[in-house]
Image (cartoon, rainbow, N blue to C red):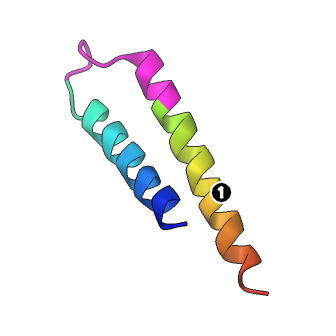
Amino acid sequence: MSIIILASMLLWGAVIHELSKPSKEQSKRKMISLMSLGSLSTLVITISLFSNLN
């Protein structure tokens, strides 16, 4: 679980880094893939945490 959390943090850090670039240097394809993977990893973490509550 900690590996997934670390990977998610790194993905969202990469998204923030890409957003901090000037708009002409931003890669839309890279942004979409990073945000999709980040959202998926966040969803996995959320589901895992809620399933452990029971």
Q: Is residue 30 magenta?
A: yes
Q: Where is 27 relative to 38, above or below?
A: above
Looking at the image, which residue is at 51% across and 26% down?
32
- Expressed as whole percent of the image width and height from the top left, the position of residue 48 reads 68, 68
Q: Residue 4: x, y in percent? A: 51, 57
**Residue displayed at 51% across by 44% down:** 38
Amino acid, disc 1 = Val
Could you classify mark 1 by the number of other residues whose Cα lies within 10 Å: few (under 14), some (14-19), or many (20 or more)?
some
The outermost residue toward the bottom is: 54
Q: Which residues are magenta?
A: 22-33
Q: Give coordinates of residue 35: x percent, y percent.
A: 50, 37
x then y, percent, for residue 42:
57, 55
| Quadrant housing residue 27 | top left
Figure disc tally? 1
In screen coordinates, is 44 left or right of 16?
right
In the shown orientation, is residue 8 left or right of residue 52? left
Q: Residue at x 76, y 75 (%)?
A: 51
In the displayed structure, 9 sits above or below 38; it is below
The question of residue 46 being in magenta is answered with no
Residue found at the very far top of the displayed protein: 24
- Where is residue 46, by image quadrant? bottom right
Which element type, helix, strand or loop, lies under badge 1? Answer: helix
Q: Which residue is at the far right? A: 54
Q: Quadrant of residue 47?
A: bottom right
Quarter holding the C terminus is: bottom right
Looking at the image, which residue is at 62% across and 46% down?
Answer: 40
User: Which residue position is annotated with label 1?
Assistant: 44
User: Which quadrant, please, contains the N terminus?
Assistant: bottom right
Vertical relation: 52 (above or below) 6: below
